[in-house]
Image (tube, coloured by chain):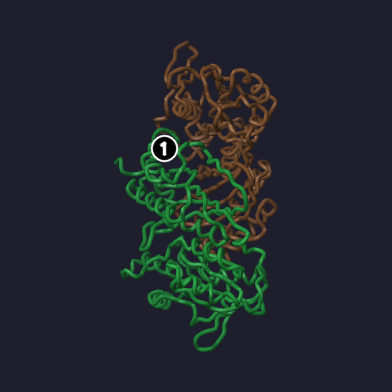
Chain colours: A brown, B green
Amino acid sequence: MNDVILLSHGNGGLSTKKLIEDIILKHLGERGEKELYDAAVINMEGRYAFSTDSFVISPIFFNGGDIGKLAVDGTCNDLGVMGARPLYLSLSFIIEEGFKLSDFERVVKSIKEAADENNVSIVTGDTKVVEKGKGDGIFINTAGIGIITDRRDWRDRKIKEGDLVLVSGTMGDHGTSIMLQRLGIDTTEEVRSDVAPSGLLGVELLDRFSGIKFMRDPTRGGLATVLNEVAEMYSVGIEIDEERVPVKGWVKEATEVLGIEPYYIANEGKIVVIADKQEAEDILSYMHSHPLGKDAAIIGEVTKGKRVYLRTKIGTKRILDFLKKDLLPRIC
Amino acid sequence: MNDVILLSHGNGGLSTKKLIEDIILKHLGERGEKELYDAAVINMEGRYAFSTDSFVISPIFFNGGDIGKLAVDGTCNDLGVMGARPLYLSLSFIIEEGFKLSDFERVVKSIKEAADENNVSIVTGDTKVVEKGKGDGIFINTAGIGIITDRRDWRDRKIKEGDLVLVSGTMGDHGTSIMLQRLGIDTTEEVRSDVAPSGLLGVELLDRFSGIKFMRDPTRGGLATVLNEVAEMYSVGIEIDEERVPVKGWVKEATEVLGIEPYYIANEGKIVVIADKQEAEDILSYMHSHPLGKDAAIIGEVTKGKRVYLRTKIGTKRILDFLKKDLLPRIC
């Protein structure tokens, strides 16, 4: 009876205080605010990125990670691809009454580990509880602030014909593994999410290569969505080669059976880069030397036109449009 | 069929894009980011406050406001009481499948109005959709960044015996009105939440009065929780007078019937101030001259000891402890 979340944990009184002290501050204390003001106070000077995401993934524990790691890596990655080194995170929980305290503690521990890995401080937070049946276990929101340097700020660089498109690794691991787990298909050890702090690789790359003109993490909507957004934003065409897009064997098999394409599936530990042709090989080598980029590949190039095309193995070329089909919900 | 939120609105593809463009950017465009990067980029120099809150209030539309206004005012007020003028907000939705698009648009419009009132920019956001029965209409998270000046930063000022305690208005309006509406009790026009950008009053006061040593908005847990936190944080006692705490007639009646005390009930448009005795009267006058402080009062003082006491009308004195009883959940 005492090992689950109660509505009183959200009432702002003693129970809330106890939950914060016994679980949240116990684990995050080192990475968190000591004084319990309603806001963190931070000195800042420079250019910063600010981003937020709410995480509603189901199941909350999955092969390769959990909602806690996802909530930290997800927001830090959004900062990293903008050239921002993550500094501060806010952390907000919406918990369903009856959620196991042991599961909550497991999530908080995972948040701590991911915060350590990203070297980010959790400086402010909030906890709400909703009645049983009005939520689904736990939802987490994080908002993050990261610092950008001029060198890492790619926003004003112009994408042009001939620029190359790179990915830092295999496409579709996260979404496919979640789908298989949700469908209850007995999976092997290799079937796992790629959730990882890929923004850290992004920041390292941007520090080293001024020829990087665009970077994003292909999460919901996958690679195809990112490329379509680039095509629209910069009024360019993009062509990628089916053969060069790295896809793991189990992802290939599963997506063929499910009738979906890995280009539309969410990744949580990968980045897409568009770079000057001259630097692309060096960027690729650097990725290969990095633990988060060992399967990196140059997959295509920027062209004339305004659409995204896939050149297939059999030599045809077809439009790779924005995602229209409904994939499984709640993959992040 | 087309006037409700579908799971596809959360898939990151075309439907998500359409929802963002047709409703969110349509209303927030003026106050929001034009370019759809995953993070906003901001130049900052100085001392900033950073705060977050998730809002799960039920019902989402209530007398005096709605979840949208609450989500903006709530986070801006948390910044304001720290001496921070709100500058940037992130905005993240978790929407239940089947939620009416017209209600979503109503919430977004309300967010826009509240953002205008607080003069804050909504610079980054996220939208997630969960299956019917896995959420409850709409939950909103906001995280905010505000700028602090030295003059407004009260954190290092020492609270001492004899300092006075002020509130900017009547206590218990928000929570009591939500309870009455939830209980389905037919209420009159005066039964309404006090949700308001009271942080703006806070910032004005801190700009003018260096004798302010502490400021907080008494939301969940109410006045009693804030005072107990002060007593604990600063190792002081506090005594307040029942007769001097402003409470509206309908709040008094309802709380008596419900057997709860207005000191524990959430407010969403009020601030609690602890100030040097010398300046307290001037602060009170300034509050009285402000639309958000017309019912302000000096309600008690800092004493020896480490507890919070209530001096009752009949001349007794009793401990006003941390909230232990369970009040109605989801009042914010």
Residue situated furthest top in the rendering? A315
The extreme left residue here reads B1
Judged left or right of residue A122, residue A175 is left
Residue at (54, 17) in percent of width and height: A162
Q: Which chain is indicated by disc 1?
A: B
* Residue B315 image point, x, y percent: 53, 89
Residue beneath disc 1: B16
Quarter of the figure with the N terminus of chain B: top left
Q: Residue at x 32, y 69 (%)?
A: B187
Q: Nearer the viewer, residue B153 or A56?
A: B153
Type of residue at label 1? Thr
Q: Nearer the viewer, residue B329 or A227?
A: A227
**In the image, A161: left or right of A289?**
left
Residues A122 and B200: in front is B200
Residue B229 visible at all: no
On the image, the x and y values in percent for residue B48 come to 60, 53
| Residue B14 visible in rendering | yes
- How many numbered callouts? 1
Looking at the image, residue A25 lies above or below residue B290: above
Res B150 → quadrant: bottom right
Instruction: Tell me the SS state at disc 1.
Output: helix
